[in-house]
Image (cartoon, rainbow, N blue to C red):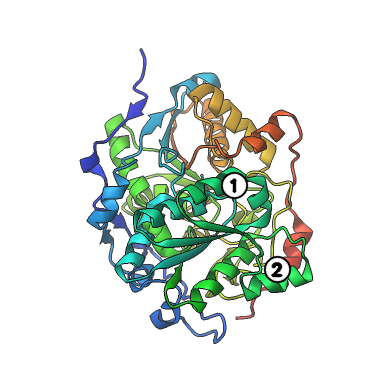
């Protein structure tokens, strides 16, 4: 008997509200501090960077926040996204476990990121903003924001980490097709960029540097605001459409997951899938939730839970989070994405308080899982997403060993069509594991703010 493999919802089932986990947290969320005064930040402090509606959402205690009709209309281009049961992967693993995945790669830029990009562009447009700046590493976020700005007729300037700018020219093309202006970071367009270029003209750049440039650009111009693709509460909020849809689809499948899994860079796709399930966990459902990160950038499993800046130039507010230090840059041989030094404060707090688990994998193990997945399920996953696949496979193998029927749900956050050079490296045996860079982390942690 062939099991059903695909669970589809019609357009009317696109969620009408985002789920805000903050009022349901069984513990208080630590305050956010101003980077200079070291006092708690006020909405006015954030007003030069973000539109007021997003600042409100950042600190909202409303459990549900209505999704504007204009945003839902654009969501309809790719939402609801499909939920699949990975029957071929189950067969390959010969496991009694049932493996489900929510596929966010069907969006035009190929990942979950437009779920928040569209919302952010909408609120900026509503408040009269003309231009948005942002940073991008591999280019996923930059391309999502470029598409969103294009829909709302906003200018978009993307500071793209220099190594990626040259290594991933097609992500840059995509951003330019959607009308964005893309420069390699560090760039001569900002003081932060100039300073780094003076010290090291060959600097490969990093997300922390690119954030500094994008924030500085936004603060300097009245018509411009800044947009962030992960980490912050309002970004995680917008991603909860993933989990709300998945809850309905699991119901169609007649099952409830025993374990929910997502890869974590800044934490947004993981939160998007898992927070609606954690809501059910708070109500008493038995469920494990697992965040998966690379061993070469292990903020949850090897970082420190403390206040840190979000960027190198120390312009962002201080967030309490698991961090490897704001100057931490993962080794160049790391090919799997998820390179941010910190972790979303909400994800960090849930981990610190024992509501979620975390696991770290070396890159050859995750690419191996990505290739197994492509060969069984057909989809070539984004390198980031292969971390979640690895953990799902290991859960299924553990269930097999214990003879358990375990229901596993993971987020397939994007496709890997722009990451084929990383797969090439893996397939030709050139990808090496680089374990926990202890010295680099210790060095970066010396520069944590004293608060
Ligand atoms: C950006 C990205 C991630 C990591 O970011 P999160 O905020 O942790 O979700 C994961 N997967 C894909 C496909 C991405 O583009």
Q: Residues within 10 Å of mark 1 (few under 14, many from 20)?
A: some
Q: Residues within 10 Å of mark 2 (few under 14, many from 20)?
A: some
Callout 2: helix, strand or loop? helix
Please provide percent x and percent y for residue 358.
56, 50
Mark identifier at residue 78: none
| Quadrant (top left/top right/bottom left/bottom right) for the C terminus | bottom right
Q: Earlier in the sequence, mark 1 or mark 2?
A: 1
Q: Quadrant of residue 46?
A: bottom left
Give the residue drawn at x 49%, y 25%: 377
Name the residue that disc number 1 marks.
359
Using residue 146 as the reference point, say whether residue 5 is left or right of it.
left
- Foreground of the two, 124 or 208: 124
Apparent side of residue 210 relative to residue 332 in the rendered image (left or right): left
Circle 2 residue: 445
Above or below, comparing residue 321 to residue 145 in the picture: below
Quadrant of the image containing the N terminus: top left
State the residue lying farthest toward the left.
12
Residue 422 versus residue 18: which sits nearer the camera?
Answer: 422
Looking at the image, residue 247 sits to the left or right of residue 290; the answer is left
- Residue drawn at (52%, 81%), measured in percent from left and top? 34
Q: Position of residue 175 (x, y in %)?
A: 50, 50
Image coords of residue 426 (percent x, y): 70, 33
Instruction: Decide: is 442 above or below 248.
Output: below
**Between marks 1 and 2, how big is the CA–CA gap?**
21 Å
The location of residue 430, given as percent across then percent down, is 76, 35
**Front disc: 1 or 2:** 2
Tell me if residue 128 can be seen.
yes
Assign a secondary structure to mark 1. strand
């Amino acid at each position: 008997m062939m099991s059903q493999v695909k669970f589809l919802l019609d357009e009317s089932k696109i969620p009408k509200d985002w789920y805000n986990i903050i009022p349901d947290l069984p513990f208080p969320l630590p305050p956010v501090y101003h980077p200079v005064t070291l006092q708690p930040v006020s909405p006015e402090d954030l007003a030069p960077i973000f539109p007021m509606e997003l600042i409100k959402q950042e600190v909202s205690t409303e459990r549900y926040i209505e999704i504007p009709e204009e945003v839902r209309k654009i969501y309809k281009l790719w939402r609801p996204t499909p939920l699949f049961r990975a029957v071929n992967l189950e067969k390959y693993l010969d496991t009694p476990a049932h493996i489900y995945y929510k596929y966010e790669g069907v969006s035009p830029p190929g990942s979950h990121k437009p779920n928040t990009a569209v919302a952010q562009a909408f609120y900026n447009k509503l408040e009269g903003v003309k231009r948005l700046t942002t940073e991008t590493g591999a280019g996923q976020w930059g391309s999502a924001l470029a598409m969103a700005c294009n829909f709302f007729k906003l200018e978009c300037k993307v500071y793209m980490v220099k190594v990626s700018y040259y290594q991933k020219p097609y992500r840059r093309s995509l951003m330019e097709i959607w009308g964005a202006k893309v420069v390699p970071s560090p760039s001569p367009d900002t003081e932060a960029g100039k300073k780094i270029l003076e010290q090291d003209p060959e600097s490969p750049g990093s997300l922390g540097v690119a954030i500094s440039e994008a924030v500085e650009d936004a603060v300097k111009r009245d018509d411009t605001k800044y947009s962030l693709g992960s980490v912050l509460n309002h970004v995680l909020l917008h991603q909860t459409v993933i989990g709300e849809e998945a809850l309905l689809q699991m119901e169609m499948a007649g099952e409830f997951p025993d374990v929910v899994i997502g890869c974590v860079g800044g934490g947004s796709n993981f939160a998007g899938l898992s927070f609606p399930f954690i809501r059910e966990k708070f109500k008493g459902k038995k469920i494990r939730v697992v965040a998966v990160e690379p061993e070469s950038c292990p903020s949850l499993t090897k970082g420190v839970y403390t206040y840190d800046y979000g960027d190198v130039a120390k312009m962002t507010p201080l967030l309490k989070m698991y961090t490897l230090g704001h100057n931490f840059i993962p080794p160049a041989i790391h090919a799997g994405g998820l390179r941010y030094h910190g972790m979303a404060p909400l994800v960090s707090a849930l981990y610190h308080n024992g509501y979620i688990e975390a696991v770290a994998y070396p890159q050859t193990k995750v690419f191996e899982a990505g290739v197994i997945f492509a060969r069984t399920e057909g989809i070539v996953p984004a390198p980031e997403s292969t971390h979640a696949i690895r953990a799902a496979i290991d859960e299924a193998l553990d269930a097999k060993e214990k003879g358990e029927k375990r229901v596993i749900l993971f987020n397939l956050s994007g496709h890997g069509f722009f990451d084929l050079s990383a797969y090439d490296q893996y397939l030709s045996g050139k990808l090496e594991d680089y374990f926990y860079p202890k010295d680099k982390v210790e060095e970066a942690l010396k520069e944590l703010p004293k608060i």
